[in-house]
Image (tube, rainbow, N blue to C red):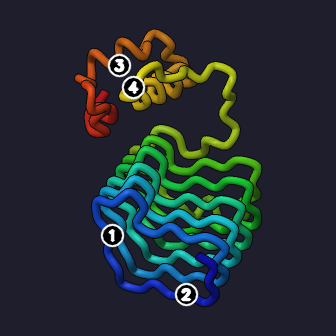
Amino acid sequence: MGCVNLSIINCSFESCEYGIYISSCDDISLINSSFVGCDHGFYSVLGVNASINGVVFDEDWIGISLVNESGCSINGSDFIGACLGLEIINSNNTNISFNRFISNVVAYSTFNSSVLNDNLGSNVFNSTILADFSSFDDSSIILQYDMWSCGPASLATVLGKLGYSNFTQDFIINYTSVDGNGSNLLNLYLF
């Protein structure tokens, strides 16, 4: 869906796969909205000048995904309890300022992207395991071996990178009561 000058104001999205998924949209404004319990809160690809202000991403798997975007601005938003608060892939000139990243596994991740770091220090990071995932060495990523073990594999990888290599995927599966339905994010977080 291509669009120009789209404004989304005061909207709520709950328990959905994608709260908003847009493609090839320019000058998007997302203001004072909330995404609760979504797989992806806001997913935008091939756009220019998206502006995200005062938005709450609460318990989403991934709060925001920006892919092949240019000139985006994310200001004054809250990322709470996500596996990954903000991911920026193949994008440039992204401004991230005055946001709060609270109790996320990873606050933000960039890949092949430029972030305007002048304002990065204005963000607040509380109870977040990793603030910046962009320089992560992928040489020792632990791959999942079942459909339901992606959470434990991811957690084992992150813990291994932090020097806790004794926490294997199998150990995490047993400790966090993973079953055929997968992982409970709260159990992984409490691990």
Q: Determine the CA span between mark 1 and mark 2.
A: 17 Å
Percent across and percent down for residue 73 are 62, 73
Q: Which mark is residue 13?
A: 1
Q: Could you say which disc has been placed on residue 172 in the image? A: 3
Crowd band around label 3 with a 10 angstrom C-alpha radius: few (<14), some (14–19), many (20+): many
Name the image quarter holding residue 188.
Answer: top left
| Residue type (three-letter) at the residue carrying disc 3 | Ile
Circle 2 sits on which residue?
A: 6
State the CA–CA distance, disc 1 to disc 3. 31 Å
Q: CA distance from mark 3 to mark 4?
A: 10 Å
Secondary structure at badge 4 equals loop
Q: Amino acid at mark 4?
A: Ser
The quarter in which the N terminus is drawn is bottom right
> Which numbered disc, 3 or 4, marks the residue that appears first in the sequence?
4
Which quarter of the picture shows residue 46? bottom right
How many numbered callouts? 4
CA separation, marks 2 and 3? 43 Å
Q: Secondary structure at mark 3?
A: helix
